[in-house]
Amino acid sequence: MTVRKGKKLTISIQEHMAIDVCPGPIRPIRQISAYFPRLSPTAEPISPNPASPLALSPGVGASGGTSASLLSPLQAGARGGGGTLSAASSIETSVDICSSDSDDSTALGTLEFELRYERATSSLHCTIIRAKGLKPMDFNGLADPYVKLHLLPGACKANKLKTKTVRNSLNPVWNETLTYIGITEEDMLRKTLRLSVCDEDKLTHNEFIGESRVALRRVKPDQTKRFYICLEHPPPLPSPTAMGAALRGISCYLREWENEQLTSLEERGRLLLSLQFLTPPAEGEEGRRGGLYVGVLRCAHLAAMDVNGFSDPYVKIYLKPDVKKKSKHKTAVIKKTLNPEFNEEFFYEISLSELVHKTLEVTVWDYDLGRSNDFIGGVCLSCHVQGDALRHWMDCLRNKGQRVERWHILANELPQTTCHD
């Protein structure tokens, strides 16, 4: 490059590109998680360092002894003593991200709660303790939060529980215990509890703040487990428009398969039955008659069959084969509920040798005035079935004189699904 006296200094485009495009030393590509670390709530907070912000900066030459990259990820323990969570500790606790530069990195808040499963009563207790640092949802910079619980998979209306609403707070304290009844050990292995934090609005629809999901298999029976969970956005649904033709076909197939699995796992509700077989009393002795006593105690999480989101349930029982058509019993109708309590007992005068060849059919129905009643679900107990129904039946026959109670999952299909009232 030559410059004549009296002329302006000019640089050719080739020289300009050679100066500005020099890449410098090649560095390995870091993972995006290195730029957004999840820190432990017990660790010391990271102190901001104004001398080295995360900003775009040109590289310094080799003579300077340093070379700055475009973005410098935070290293564990490099500043302020904070460290990243290990795989084991991240399961127990989650923390909010200390950044508010964009909407994507804004923390939704944290939720603290306890879970306890009591095996003897088949109940799951969820104690909602408090939330911290919730995202403001109202014009005054606050929120009116409450917590909703759902058991997945399952009917949303039947197993939804809700806490009270705390007004004008981003750090609400509830200390409220919500209880699910009729939860079996099988449910604890395959079900997931979803906790959703929402903002209540009286004039408009309620707004969603964040949610968290906990697999119930992490809770041991008869032990209380406490969780500190960071709220998250709901998982996004896959968009077929963003996929290629082949991926779109696979996505549709997987969606159909998932719907079939959810349909097979569809539950119509739970039924708590008690069975007791008494031998006939000897001559001259006073006592209860000998035979089978069937107690219909209660139902839980029934499917909603009416337009108002509830049902009008009642229970019918048969002891089949029923040659004389005299084994039918029916409970009273409980209006507008999905968790009815019946506490009714019925008696069949029958010997043990005859009972071995019988099948107890218990069905739950929704009463409709002026039209046919809707079948909700049912269960059959005999020596020819499997699972909990068989165990309950055999326990009744073996433990004569003892009352045996057990929860049963209602099946959505039985040999007879029409009402003959």
Image (cartoon, rainbow, N blue to C red):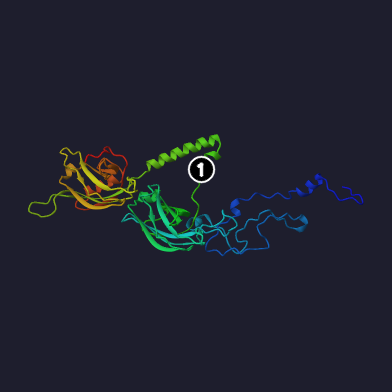
Q: Name, please, the residue furthest toward the left.
A: 284
Q: Quadrant of the C terminus?
A: top left
Q: Position of residue 205 (x, y in %)?
A: 44, 53
> Looking at the image, which residue is at 73% across and 48% down?
23
- Which of 120/9 is in front? 9
Q: Secondary structure at mark 1?
A: loop
Label 1 crowd (10 A; few <14 / some 14-19 / many >=20): few
Quadrant for residue 360, please give it.
top left
> Looking at the image, which residue is at 60% across and 61% down?
77
- Residue 84 vertical position relative to residue 239 in the rendered view, above or below: below
Q: Position of residue 143 (x, y in %)?
A: 48, 60
Quadrant for residue 356, please give it.
top left
Quadrant for residue 411, please give it.
top left
Disc 1 marks which amino acid? Pro
- Left or right: residue 190 compared with residue 6: left
Q: Position of residue 96 (x, y in %)?
A: 53, 59
- Left or right: residue 319 compared with residue 266: left
Q: Name, please, the residue furthest toward the right.
A: 5
> Looking at the image, which residue is at 63% across and 51% down?
30
Q: Which residue is mark 1?
A: 238
- Left or right: residue 217 compared with residue 311: right
- Which of 143/317 is in front? 143
- Left or right: residue 4 compared with residue 245: right
Q: Name, please, the residue furthest toward the front.
A: 203
- Residue 280 vertical position relative to residue 421 in the rendered view, above or below: below
Q: Position of residue 237 (x, y in %)?
A: 50, 44
